[in-house]
Amino acid sequence: MRPDRVVVGECRGSEVRELVSALNTGHDGGAGTVHANGLQDVSARLEALGALAGMDPAALARQAVSAFDLVLHVERRRGVRRLVGVGRPVLRPDGRLDLRPVDTPR
């Protein structure tokens, strides 16, 4: 099999390990959903899910930086979804995950 893209509907637990593993295998496209209150909370959410999978924060961070090109924060209000933030995963000096906001044209 040669899948062209990997799509995971939602990560709520240890399956985050499989998501980052699958996206680190050289496929050209992929997507997944993680619920967080905002872009600034995604790192903590991924670390918590990684802990459920037995991953320490540094291992999760290295996998996430390699797996994800961008993180999109989508908000739904009155039934309408809109993009409210874009972040690029980066490693902090202490080896943990952070998201650097990316300017987006309005």
Image (spheres, rainbow, N blue to C red):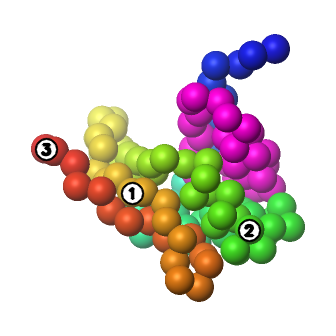
Instruction: Report crowding for label 3: few under 14, some 14 to 19, many 20 or more residues within 10 A (C-alpha).
Output: few
Up-down: is 29 above or below 77?
above
Which numbered dot is residue 59? 2
| First in sequence: mark 2 vs mark 1 | 2
Q: Distance between the residues labelled 2 and 1?
A: 20 Å
Residue denoted by label 1:
87
Span highlighted in magenta in the image: 11-34
Q: Which residue is drawn at 62% across and 78% down?
A: 95
Residue denoted by label 3:
106
Q: Position of residue 13 (x, y in %)?
A: 76, 55
In reply to whether residue 52 is colored magenta, the answer given is no
Kind of residue indicated by mark 1: Gly
Kind of residue indicated by mark 2: Ala
Q: In this view, which residue lies farthest toward the bottom?
A: 94
Q: Residue at x 30, y 56 (%)?
A: 102
Q: In which quarter of the image is the N terminus?
A: top right
Kind of residue indicated by mark 3: Arg
| First in sequence: mark 1 vs mark 3 | 1
Which numbered dot is residue 97? none
Q: Distance between the residues labelled 3 and 2?
A: 35 Å
Residue closer to the observer: 28 or 46: 28
